Image: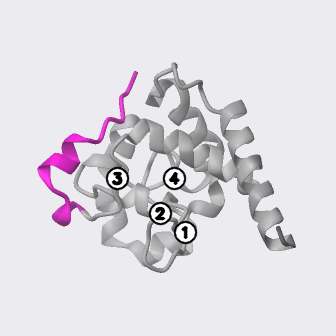
């Protein structure tokens, strides 16, 4: 194995160890109340907290809110569900995704905020994916009813 392969293998093992140590066990059902809310509070609230606009207000002045480093509110289950399986289905998944399943392999614009390093980002992305269930990068207009029904995202 060359240096690049060793490095990739080490990163993969690190991500797996981090995911196992920080995420709820596979026997624990990930819910908004037992994992996602705390993660959003820790990693997202600065820009998506109670001072942020609703999705409707954000869409009316996206550039203005972006200049203020504010995105749509994600401080409640109802607010986050707009981007998971509501009027903006898939928005959160596209922004948090690591790019592994995209044509250009580029991560979403918010992926870097999931953690301080690759291992923490991988663990937190795994937590979000476990919670969502039917992880889908499609926009609301393109998602099928079957794909919409595969989204779990339980509250508690």
Mark 2 or 1, closer to the camera = 1
Which type of secondary structure does the marked residue at label 4 adopt? helix
Residue 33, image x, y percentages:
48, 25
Residue 154, image x, y percentages:
36, 29
Mark 4 or 1, closer to the camera = 1
Relative to 58, say whether 31 is above or below: above
Mark 3 or 2, closer to the camera = 2
Per the model, the C-alpha gap separating discs 4 and 2 is 13 Å
Which label's residue is closer to the chain start, 2 or 1? 2
Residue 88, image x, y percentages:
28, 58
- The tag on residue 95 is 2
> Is 153 a magenta residue?
yes
Viewer-closest of 67 and 114: 114
Q: Bounds of the magenta span?
A: 140-156
Query: How many neighbours does mark 3 have within 10 angstroms: few (below 14), some (14-19), or many (20 or more)?
Result: many
Residue bearing the label numbered 3: 83
Which label's residue is closer to the chain start, 4 or 1? 4
Residue bearing the label numbered 4: 48
Residue bearing the label numbered 1: 107
Compared across the picture, whether 143 is left or right of 111 comes to left
Q: Residue at x 48, y 28 (%)?
A: 30
Viewer-closest of 78 and 24: 24
From the image, which quarter does the N terminus lie in?
bottom right
Q: Residue at x 55, y 44 (%)?
A: 126
Q: Residue at x 32, y 68 (%)?
A: 59
Per the model, the C-alpha gap separating discs 4 and 3 is 12 Å
Relative to 44, say whether 63 is above or below: below
Query: How many neighbours does mark 1 have within 10 angstroms: few (below 14), some (14-19), or many (20 or more)?
Result: some
Query: How many neighbours does mark 4 have within 10 angstroms: few (below 14), some (14-19), or many (20 or more)?
Result: many
């Amino acid at each position: 194995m060359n240096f690049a392969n060793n490095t990739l293998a080490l990163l993969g093992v690190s991500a797996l160890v981090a995911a196992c140590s920080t995420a709820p066990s596979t026997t624990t059902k990930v819910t908004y109340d037992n994992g996602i809310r705390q993660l959003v509070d820790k990693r997202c609230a600065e820009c998506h907290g109670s001072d942020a606009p609703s999705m409707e207000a954000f869409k009316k002045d996206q550039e203005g809110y972006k200049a203020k480093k504010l995105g749509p509110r994600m401080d409640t289950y109802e607010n986050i569900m707009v981007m998971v399986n509501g009027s903006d289905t898939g928005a959160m998944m596209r922004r948090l995704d690591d790019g592994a399943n995209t044509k250009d392999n580029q991560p979403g614009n918010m992926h870097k905020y999931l953690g301080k390093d690759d291992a923490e980002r991988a663990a937190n992305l795994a937590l979000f994916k476990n919670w969502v269930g039917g992880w889908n990068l499609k926009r609301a207009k393109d998602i099928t009813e079957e794909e919409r029904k595969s989204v779990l995202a339980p509250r508690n």
